[in-house]
Image (tube, rainbow, N blue to C red):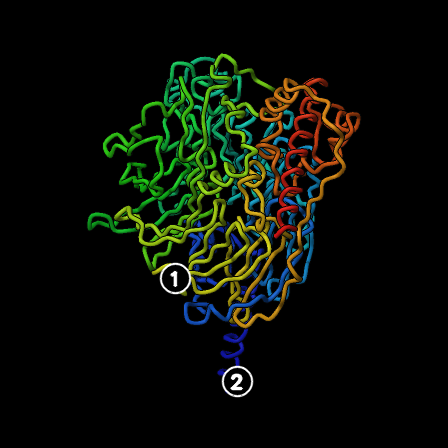
Amino acid sequence: MGANRAVWTVVLAAGVMALAGCSDKGGAGGVNADRIIAADSTPGDWISHGRTYSEQRFSPLEKINTSNVQDLGLAWSFELPENRGIEATPLVTGGVMYTTSAWSIVRAFDAKTGKLLWTYDPKVPRSTGVKACCDSVNRGVALWEGRVFVGTLDGRLEALDAKSGRLVWSKVTVDQTKPYTITGAPRVVKGKVLIGNGGAELGVRGYLSAYDAKTGEMAWRFYTVPGKKESDGSASDEAMKKARPTWNGEFWKVGAGGTVWDSMAYDPDLDLLYIGVGNGSPWNRDIRSPGGGDNLFLSSIVALRPSTGEYVWHYQTTPGETWDYTATQHIVLADITVGGKPRKVLMQAPKNGFFYVLDRTDGKLISAQKYVASVNWASHIDPVSGRPVESPGARYEKALHLSNPGPLGAHNWHPMAFSPKTGLVYIPAQEIPFPYMQPGGDKANFKYRPQGWNVGIDFLVAGLPDDEAQLKAIRASLKGRLIAWDPVSQTEKWSVDYSGPWNGGVLATAGGLVFQGNATGEFSAYDAGSGKKLWGFDTQTGVVAPSMTYEIDGEQYVALMAGWGGGFAVSAGAGVDPRSEGPRRLLVFKVGGKEKLPARPVSKKEFMDLPPSSATPQQIATGTAVFAANCGVCHGAGAVSEFSIPDLRYSPTITDAAIFKSIVIDGDRSELGMVSFKSLMNESEAEAVRHYLLDLARRQKAKQVAALGLASKD
């Protein structure tokens, strides 16, 4: 009996130790390569950006399913004070949720109750916002061995203690005197934190860096385009020997671009890291690389060895990129059967409108087809060469070309999802045409501007008309869809049409569901097989972020960071549905959730008293051109903003010349993000901009007064 008791004591002790080990492994302290690779063994957690290294954004959880999703309700929510775009994917492990909001602020919550555990604010200078092409957003954190990693908008990579939010180490990853930013989520592979950057619109050279997760020391750096020197002493030196002959002229003077600002995936069996590379700097190849050239590795998927940064292979989706057709869109890895044979594939739906299926072992093209029928810059992808067959005039060398897609893409950063159960990829697709033209009709008019955008096209021709009928027609041309795509047959199986573009990222689950929020403020669940809408919730704000799902104590939850923002929101206000603007929140749902949101706030814009016009037609014309060249990317084409960045037609600052000058020229509101623009315009031009805005305000006010008069007669 004593011997048996001793045996059971050992067994029980081992069990307790095993349970303790499981508990530790269930939290951030136990997140490592083994846990991420074996993510399906702990399906209740979501511990990496796309849940797994394959980035499929598919969850094996099925307690929320097609039979009960109609009973989904709000479990808890959190009001976010940051009034900018919200794009993060929360991570959950050990009952704790880690997520980010605008300005790279990190928060940890009790994932069951919503209790805020800690907040970390990296204190990003608000003046950094002028360097961000597409809002002061952040797409989330990475977890590894008890630390939380975040990239900050001003170019730092920081490691935080997962329990307290305390800063452990911080590294500046960019030259902060240049217009670099970080908006993407880091990934951690083999103990190395991987982080890229953005800024190609303004003029930078792109790269990916790897830092030791424990010490913060840089392990390697891979440049995606050549620099002025033949060698950087970096992991990319050999690859640059391959890339340099595909460039012409002094391309490095305006950065050349190629920023790695979002997508990454990793295959642990092949030990290959896949990165998506962005657009050229400038966009316009005629200016960037006179005489042509493919300009490697712009708009490419590049495979690297994660331990060393060694180049293995690449596939260029848009050779000689000249439209901002990045390949930074979501990369998904899967094993599928093609032509009766199992294939290890990489799938991407980049901006250019073609869906690519590649062999991820060697980068060879398996197939590519248009996933948006309106694509007009190329007719098809040649299956032998893998190159697009371009349409005449698409490169706008001599004349304007109205292209579809435009620079916002047929699919932007918003993650898609792949379901192994249905074999379908779910794409948040869109149609946003754009008129490309050489600056002032001639590339010779291009001049590099240290503070401004340097894309090498004429933004003035992309301005929006004031006529309401024309605006209505433009809005009607902007489309958004959720597409269920078969990557084997390269055909659409079903789709959901939305009233406009810029809809949220996608989640697929083993419960037979696809979740997506949209630009007009509805978070919906669809049947993954048929596309039938099964459930919807009013988020009170446009949604751009993807949702995720997790499980605690046997109960499944779905979480969503809801908050309108990003590139389309800040640049195309006149094309934005008024329902998009609303409060920023973290929303968490469960079956039987009973919480309620406050009533949807009503946005009301009122005009101030406007002085009589004293401007000449020439002054207003000058202001129109200066605004288009310098201001529209943030304040909206035609100064129409439906976003948190001020709609200048309603701003009292435009009625006072001295105040307007103090802001635009003197930089009196730099701490609020509005830096001085004296390097881009003189006082006379700033005053012309003010008169242009006053002219817009007067016309808008007159339309509103007329509409009110008509309403009163009715």
In the displayed structure image, the side of residue 133 where residue 128 appears, left or right: right
Q: Is residue 561 depicted above or below 331 in this figure? A: below
- Where is residue 129, by image quadrant? top right
* Residue displayed at 32% across by 27% down: 391
In what element is the residue under mark 1? loop
Q: Are marks 2 and 1 in contact (CB under 8 Å)?
A: no
- Where is residue 345, by image quadrant? top left
Q: Which three-letter amino acid code belongs to the residue tagged 1?
A: Lys
Farthest-out residue, left: 340
| Residue 76 location (% of width, % of height) | 62, 64
Q: Which three-letter amino acid code belongs to the residue tagged 2?
A: Gly
In the displayed structure image, the side of residue 37 where residue 609 appears, left or right: right
Farthest-out residue, bottom: 1
- Where is residue 79, by image quadrant? bottom right
Disc on res. 629: none
For the question of whether residue 190 can be seen, the reply is no
In what element is the residue under mark 2? helix
| Residue 26 location (% of width, % of height) | 54, 62
Which circle's residue, 2 or 1, is located before the other in the chain?
Answer: 2
Gap between marks 2 and 1, in whole Å?
64 Å
For the question of whether residue 255 can be seen, the reply is yes
Q: Is residue 349 depicted above or below 112 in this figure? A: above
| Residue 451 location (% of width, % of height) | 63, 23
Query: To which residue does mark 2 refer?
Result: 2
User: Dot 2: within a 10 Å radius of its alpha carbon, few (fewer than 14), some, or many (20 or more) residues?
Assistant: few
Query: To which residue does mark 1 refer?
Result: 532
